[in-house]
Image: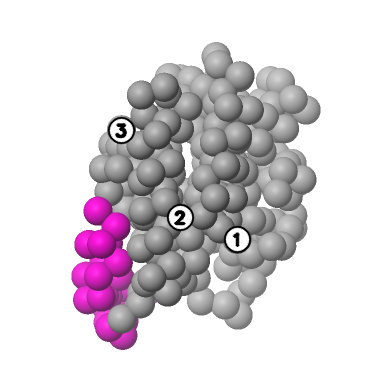
Amino acid sequence: LWVGNSFFYYNNSMHGHYREIAKSLEPKENFRGVSVTISGSGIDWHDMDTYLKPGLIGKYSFVPGNKIVFNKEGRQFDAVMMMDCSQCPVHPDLKPVFHETAKSHIAKVVKYGARPVLFMSWAYKDAPEMTAQLAEQYTIAGNANDALVVPAGLAFARAIAKRPDLELYAKDKRHPSLAGTYLGAATTYAAIRGKSPVGSTYTAGLDPELATFLQTMAWEAV
């Protein structure tokens, strides 16, 4: 379950790209994901109790042939990944809210029987200093609550350092380009599965050489 905001849902949603990367590398596994996003949302905008209640989100899935498969009642997700708003974890007024809500949400995820994950978002294109700031706060929250942290922000910084002309951002300098979304998905795969995404045949329509570079940056960051 992907819980976040527009950083997730840009480019037809990161969770779909993650699924395709994963399927290409582990074809015998069954990957299912649901994205629950609110535009501009902070982590405290989301009602984790409702998201995790059996018989609601995830109760059925659409499969090829326009058929619906009803999933068993009970725990629908193996992991729940959460992202705060792009600057909330480092904003002086919202930093405490980030840590308090992360603790509360993670406790609910664990009680529900799933693995808690935090998604470390990236710096704004014109504010690269945010990389270290966000990394620090997400790492603190992950360590404090025994949650895995997906270092997408560090992957962005690594890729930009090696290829300064690479465009990972949309025109607003905040949201991801398709390459940025792909990098986030590849980093998520590397962190959650503990395996390198290098070699995935899914490129999201990007140049294969670029896709391989982004896969490599994701694995190195993790």
Q: Secondary structure at mark 3?
A: loop
Q: CA distance from mark 1 to mark 2?
A: 10 Å
In this image, 90 relative to 76: left or right? right
Of callouts 1 and 2, the N-terminal one:
2
Disc 2: CA contacts within 10 A as few (<14), some (14-19) or many (>=20): many
Q: Nearer the viewer, residue 187 or 95?
A: 95
Q: Residue at x 67, y 29 (%)?
A: 157
Give, as a three-letter code, the residue at label 3.
Gly
Q: Are marks 1 and 2 in contact (CB under 8 Å)?
A: yes
> In the rendered structure, which segment of residues is drawn in magenta?
47-73
Disc 1: CA contacts within 10 A as few (<14), some (14-19) or many (>=20): some
Can you identify the residue that label 3 sits on? 40
- The circle drawn on residue 81 is 2
Q: Are marks 1 and 3 in contact (CB under 8 Å)?
A: no
Please identify the residue farthest to the top as the structure is shown. 126
Q: Position of residue 87 (x, y in %)?
A: 43, 27
Can you identify the residue that label 1 sits on? 192
Give, as a three-letter code, the residue at label 1.
Ile
